[in-house]
């Protein structure tokens, strides 16, 4: 009898551990760098498994027994995976604005054809966008952004225990943004995406304005000295000015990125609270 009770207790603990692992694994699937195909899948699985092993003993709540019902357990596992993926998507949107800013700056610098393969997304991206991404990712690590994301992940288990996700009308509105419309102040994904483009425009504004002034100046030079090959000279000048403005505006970009990071962490916490079960 004792061995039977111990067996069922161990089975329930193992089932709960799998659900915890699924949520953490979903986060690692979508998070920048950690979800990159440049990292072998088995290493990502081992890292998420180790993190689940660290978090699981600290949990205070466990779901109701669902092992006897395989269909419900699979549903709970997919739900936990979806929670992690949505949380990772919010973090991924943070870096989407940097790629957008890099694309715009690269086009105005004349580097629109100088694309490289991004191992994170397996797509061709601008070299400026990739440069801004790696600079921002190092700033993300320096600001302990990865620690904050993991803390929110651990905090989510206190408010949304495994297999306890509740679908409410408020939660659906939070994710879809309906009926508040699309805008930077709207909740849910419809608010995340506009803010991504707004921050991308803010980050790309200094070099784009500088290159615009250089282009106008080159046009006046072409009118004043028609014999000068301003068109060929303009390529090198725009590239030099673009990199110079990027260099001197790094501090301002870091401040904008820091503000964007704090807003992203608030969005993560808000997302968790909207899916909390009723107490």
Image: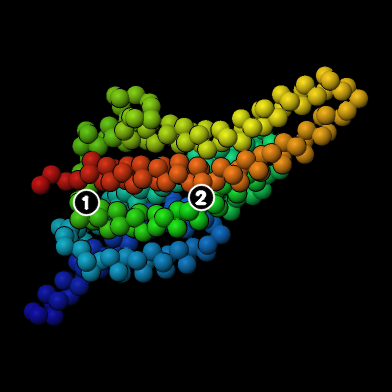
Mark 2 crowdedness (10 Å alpha carbons): few <14, some 14-19, many ≥20: some
* Figure check: 170 above or below 163: above
Q: Residues within 10 Å of mark 1 (few under 14, many from 20)?
A: many
On the image, numbered disc 2 is attached to which residue?
136
- Check the picture and name the quadrant holding the N terminus: bottom left
Of discs 2 and 1, which sits in the foreground? 2
Mark 2 falls on what kind of element? helix
Query: Which comes before the other along the chain, label 2 or label 1?
Result: 2
Q: Nearer the viewer, residue 157 or 78?
A: 157
Answer left or right for 252 relative to 55.
Answer: right
Task: Tell me which residue sits at (77%, 21%) in the image.
Answer: 220
Could you say where residue 106 lies in the image, as x and y percent from the top left? 65, 38
Q: Which mark is residue 246?
A: none
The x and y percentages for residue 185 are 34, 30
Q: Quadrant of residue 212?
A: top right
In this view, 103 is above or below 224 = below
Which of the two residues, 76 or 203, is positioned nearer the viewer here? Answer: 203
Q: Is residue 137 above or below residue 16?
A: above
**Residue 229, how many percent across, how many down?**
87, 29
Is residue 19 found left or right of 123 in the rendered image? left
Q: Residue at x 34, y 55 (%)?
A: 148
Res 268 seen here: yes
In the picture as drawn, the residue positioned furthest to the right comes out as 227
Q: In this picture, is 54 found above or below 233? A: below
| Residue 225, horizontal then vertical, whole percent | 87, 23
Q: Quick one: SS at disc 1?
A: loop
For the residues marked 2 and 1, what is the alpha-carbon distance in whole angstroms? Answer: 31 Å
Residue at x 69% of width, y 39% of height: 241
Number of the label disc, if any, that sits on residue 160: 1
């Amino acid at each position: 009898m004792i061995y039977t009770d111990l067996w069922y207790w161990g089975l329930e603990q193992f089932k709960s551990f799998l659900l915890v692992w699924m949520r953490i694994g979903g986060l690692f699937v979508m998070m920048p760098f950690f979800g990159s195909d440049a990292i072998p899948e088995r290493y990502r699985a081992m890292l998420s498994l180790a993190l689940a092993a660290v978090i699981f003993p600290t949990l205070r709540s466990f779901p109701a027994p669902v092992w006897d019902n395989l269909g419900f357990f699979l549903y709970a596992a997919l739900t936990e995976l979806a929670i992690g993926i949505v949380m990772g998507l919010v973090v991924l949107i943070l870096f989407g604005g940097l790629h957008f800013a890099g694309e715009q700056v690269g086009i105005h610098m004349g580097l629109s054809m100088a694309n490289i393969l991004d191992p994170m997304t397996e797509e061709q991206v601008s070299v400026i966008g990739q440069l801004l991404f790696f600079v921002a990712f190092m700033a993300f690590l320096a600001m302990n952004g990865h620690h904050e994301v993991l803390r929110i992940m651990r905090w989510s288990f206190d408010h949304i225990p495994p297999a306890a996700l509740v679908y409410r009308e408020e939660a659906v509105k939070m994710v879809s943004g309906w009926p508040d419309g699309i805008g930077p102040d709207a909740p849910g994904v419809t608010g995340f995406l506009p803010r991504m483009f707004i921050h991308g425009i803010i980050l790309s504004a200094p070099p784009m304005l500088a290159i615009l002034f250089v282009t106008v100046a080159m046009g006046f030079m072409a009118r004043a000295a028609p014999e000068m090959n301003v068109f060929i000279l303009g390529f090198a000048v725009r590239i030099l000015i673009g990199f110079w403005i990027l260099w001197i505006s790094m501090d301002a970009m870091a401040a904008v990125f820091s503000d964007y990071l704090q807003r992203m962490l608030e969005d993560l916490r808000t997302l968790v609270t909207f899916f909390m079960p009723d107490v």
